[in-house]
């Protein structure tokens, strides 16, 4: 896919070169699969195909930056200082959106928000946010117990896909006894918990 110049001025060849320069071969292959999955979901659900594909392609652009670079940007750009206590899991989306805008020249706020929200979700998610969140989880290279159910949920609706992913991820994180980010809990409460 060539992306419209209003979304990104770089040609596809230039864009792929810039992205691959930042990522391992395996991670670069992942983002290309997420792009394709996002395009397919966008066609199925009537979401903007260009924004979906481009957001999928760039969503992990900053994944392999160092912790020190993220911290430096958070200080320099006066991001919320609470972010300093986070880690790559949070930074590669939230701070990654800043790097995508600055280094790839993508200024579209719908795309940047979908990148910001792709790891922990959010209480309010647009269709594009939901689509990228889900595409990242079900792209054909993913292989984990439950991935078939995740794909089935995503085939039912974006909302079903998000709900399955949020509860599956939370169970997985609890089983590993790792720290649960507060936003992950907020997303769970908004999307999965019974409203009663
Ligand atoms: P990736 O960048 O394509 O690997 O996928 P994501 O950006 O969606 O997620 C990155 C990692 O963050 C995954 O391994 C998730 O399981 C993990 N993750 C998501 N939410 C949380 C959380 O609340 N706490 C912790 N510790 N990890 C999380
Ligand atoms: Fe990611
Ligand atoms: Fe994800
Ligand atoms: Fe990803």
Image (spheres, helix red, strand yellow):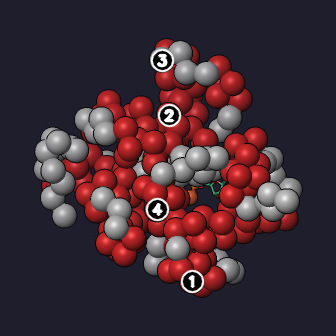
Pointer 1 residue Cβ closer than 8 Å to ligand 3: no
In front: 29, or 193? 193
Residue ID at (64%, 28%): 83
Asked if the residues shown at circle 4 and circle 1 are in contact, with their CB atoms under 8 angstroms apart, the answer is no
Q: Residues within 10 Å of mark 2 (few under 14, many from 20)?
A: many
Q: Which residue is mark 1?
A: 152
The earlier-in-sequence mark between 4 and 3 is 3
Rendered position, 100 above or below 190:
above
Taking the spot 49% from the left edge, 15% from the top edge, the residue there is 76
Tell me the quadrant of the picture where the N terminus can be found: bottom left
Label whose residue precedes the other's in the sequence (2 or 1) = 2
Q: Upstream in the sequence, badge 4 or badge 2?
A: 2
Residue 46 location, x and y as percent?
Answer: 34, 67
Q: Mark 4 and 2 residues: CB-CB less than 8 Å, in contact?
A: no
Q: CA distance from mark 4 to mark 3?
A: 29 Å
Q: Is residue 36 above or below residue 179?
A: below
User: Viewed as shown, does residue 9 lie left or right of 195?
Assistant: left
Helix, strand or loop under label 4? helix
Image x and y of residue 151, in percent = 55, 80
Residue positioned 49% across, 23% down in the render: 73
Determine the image quadrant of residue 88. top right
**x and y, in percent, of residue 34 in the image:** 41, 65
């Amino acid at each position: 896919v060539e992306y419209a110049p209003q979304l990104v001025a770089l040609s596809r060849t230039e864009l792929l070169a810039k992205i691959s320069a930042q990522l391992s071969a395996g991670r670069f292959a992942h983002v290309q699969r997420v792009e394709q999955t996002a395009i397919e979901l966008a066609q199925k659900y009537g979401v903007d195909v260009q924004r979906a594909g481009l957001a999928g392609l760039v969503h992990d652009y900053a994944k392999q930056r160092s912790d020190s670079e993220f911290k430096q940007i958070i200080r320099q750009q006066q991001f919320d200082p609470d972010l300093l206590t986070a880690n790559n899991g949070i930074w590669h989306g939230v701070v990654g959106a800043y790097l995508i805008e600055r280094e790839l020249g993508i200024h579209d706020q719908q795309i940047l928000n979908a990148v910001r929200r792709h790891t922990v979700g959010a209480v309010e998610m647009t269709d594009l946010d939901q689509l990228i969140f889900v595409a990242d989880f079900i792209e054909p290279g993913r292989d984990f117990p439950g991935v078939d159910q995740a794909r089935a949920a995503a085939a039912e609706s974006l909302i079903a896909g998000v709900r399955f992913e949020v509860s599956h991820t939370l169970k997985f994180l609890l089983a590993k006894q790792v720290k649960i980010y507060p936003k992950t809990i907020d997303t769970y409460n908004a999307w999965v918990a019974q409203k009663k």
